[in-house]
Image (cartoon, grey):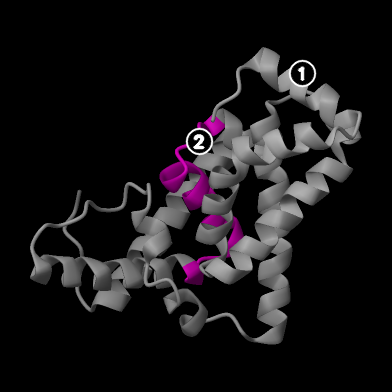
Amino acid sequence: MTLDLEAERALVERLRRRDEAAFNLFVRAYQARVFSLVQRMLGNRAEAEDLAQEVFITVFRSIDSFRGDARLGTWLYRVAINHCKNRIKYLDRRVTRGHDALDEEGGKALTEGGPVMSRPDRPDEAMQGAELNKVIERALGLLEEEHRALVVLRDLEGLSYEEIMTITGLPEGTVKSRLHRARAALREAIERGLGYKLPEQ
């Protein structure tokens, strides 16, 4: 479900009035995108489900601070990214993040709607594809959280540079240079995981 600008403004006004039906509509409109973003950032389905709920509750409680300078979805992504960064730090402190958490979904997050690779038809290719997705998922989890956020927002969620600038608060040049470094780090991590160099694009 995608809301046009007028419907979005009306929804924001209803949310400010603490309209429960509006909150349900808000969740239905954005839950798939928020969950996708959060799962790709955390690499763990159970954590992502929990955190996605927290994101919606936070936005509902703080809707009065939404100034309307950006689209509601962009602001929602900003809240989600900040929640993800906090959760990653928390999980790192508990030393529970790592290969086990990232393996849990077997790379599922990257294959659902992500442009990383297409689904092969043959069973042997399917197994190879699943292994590659595990390597990619692990490699994504090894990136610094800032780099991971940029790769997820741009390459997996398909957001524009303008939207990413709004979400991160970074100028365009910084977004582009950090994204370039993030992609290089991701490629290097994937190659380490695979044990061979990827072909140059």
Give the Cα separation between the discs numbered 1 and 2: 24 Å
Question: Which residue is at a point 70% across and 72% down the rendered structure image?
Answer: 89
- The overriding secondary structure of the stretch rendered in magenta is helix
Residue 55 belongs to the span the image colors magenta = no
Please name which of the two marks, 1 or 2, marks the residue nearer to the observer. Answer: 1
Count of numbered badges drawn on the protein = 2
Q: What mark, if any, has residue 38 been given in the picture? A: none
Q: What mark, if any, has residue 159 been given in the picture? A: 2
For the residue pair 107 and 92, the one nearer the viewer reads as: 107
Q: Amino acid at mark 2?
A: Leu
Asked whether, in this view, residue 110 is left or right of residue 50, the answer is left
Asked whether, in this view, residue 52 is left or right of residue 16, the answer is left
Residue 160 belongs to the span the image colors magenta = yes
Q: Earlier in the sequence, mark 1 or mark 2?
A: 1
Q: Quadrant of residue 24?
A: top right
What x and y, as percent, mark residue 55? 73, 51
Magenta residues, as a range? 141-161
Work out which residue is located at the far front of the displayed protein and give it: 21
What x and y, as percent, mark residue 198? 20, 63
Helix, strand or loop under label 1: helix
Question: Which residue is at a point 20% across and 48% down the rendered structure image?
Answer: 201
Q: Amino acid at mark 1?
A: Ala
Looking at the rendering, in which quadrant would you find the N terminus?
top right
Q: Is residue 111 above or below residue 71?
A: below
Mark 2 is surrounded, within 10 Å at the Cα level, by few (under 14), some (14 to 19) or many (20 or more) other residues, namely some
Question: Which residue is at a point 84% across and 22% down the rendered structure image?
Answer: 13
What x and y, as percent, mark residue 36? 51, 52
Is residue 1 among what the camera can see?
A: yes
Mark 1 is surrounded, within 10 Å at the Cα level, by few (under 14), some (14 to 19) or many (20 or more) other residues, namely few
Label 1: which residue? 10
